[in-house]
Amino acid sequence: MSSVRELLEQAGPVEHRVPLPAAEIRRRGDRRRRRGYAVGAAVAVAGVALAAFVGVQVLDSVGPRPDGNVATTPTPTPSLSGQPVRALEGTRWIPDLVVFNAATSQAYPGESGSAARALLTFEPGGVLVLDVMLPGRPVTTLRGTWQAAAADPQLGPALRASVRLSIIAPEGSPDGIVSLVTRLSLIRTAEGYTSSGPPASLTGLTLWLYDTSHTSVIGAIDLVQPGAVLPSPYPARP
């Protein structure tokens, strides 16, 4: 088994690294989850070079935004083939910030400490809400749009969905937020996966998120238990 130090070294800048096969990403992710989603159990993935950040549109300043104050009006995205994955509506997910290359470690719900945290909510009406909690900073809330379709739209390990997420990184955002938002915008496919030993607040269902070529894992998100009350600093959503 690789040491945490070796895993953290692999989680550094990835622009010169050969992409790991999807099977290896899944194996490492499952091992991380069996270990109780331990902070610092890093997973190396192929990602986006810094040049990709140029395409991120910049609109307004960083900082928490009241729920009723939406930065932009969600705009429709091109229709996807298949049936809408309506089961996503109202669900909350914990993004794996290490897989997203947004942090070298993170804290999951129920864990103490000041490590980075994030919450992704698929609200009804195609509204996407991303809450990011970085050490020493107030909660940053970003809003965008989401669309997902699949031949079998049930939310579970058999899910194979086409996904389009649209979200904007505000001007002056920390590198972690820029990386997270950039990768979310590059996602084209989501695949369900179940793992053992999740924290009590999570269901054990993971969505692995891929780019257009389906050769690189862009990120991973873990489903929050319906009705679970997440402790501070997580905001109450949806």
Image (cartoon, helix red, strand yellow):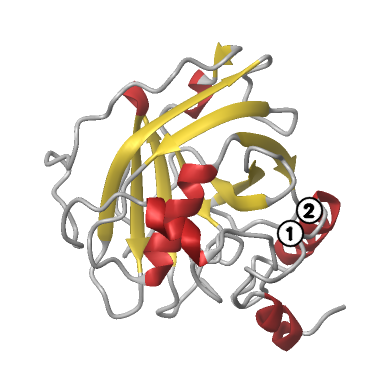
- Say which element carries label 2: helix
Q: From this viewpoint, is residue 145 visible?
A: yes
- Say which element carries label 1: helix
Q: Is residue 225 left or right of residue 216?
A: left
Residue at position x 32%, y 64% in the image: 233
Circle 2: is it few (<14), some (14-19), or many (20+) Cα within 10 Å? Answer: some
Quadrant of the image containing the C terminus: top left
Where is residue 2? Give x, y as percent. 83, 80
Quadrant of the image containing the N terminus: bottom right
Residue at position x 48%, y 38% in the image: 226
Look at label 1 and name its amino acid: Gly
> Closest to the observer: 160 or 194?
160
Looking at the image, is 107 positioned above or below residue 123? below
> Closest to the observer: 47 or 117?
47
Residue at position x 46%, y 61% in the image: 179
> Closest to the observer: 51 or 113?
51
Q: Name the residue under label 2.
A: 26
Numbered badge on residue 117: none
Looking at the image, is 21 positioned above or below residue 173? above
Q: From this viewpoint, is residue 93 visible?
A: no
Numbered badge on residue 29: 1
Where is residue 158? Give x, y as percent. 75, 28
CA gap, disc 2 and disc 1: 5 Å
Looking at the image, is 20 positioned above or below residue 203? below
Residue at position x 68%, y 66% in the image: 36
Where is residue 104? Give x, y as percent. 55, 76
Circle 1: is it few (<14), some (14-19), or many (20+) Cα within 10 Å? Answer: many
Look at label 2 and name its amino acid: Arg
Where is residue 60? Give x, y as percent. 16, 54
Asked whether the beta carbons under mark 2 and mark 1 sit within 8 Å of each other, the answer is yes
> Closest to the observer: 208 or 124?
208
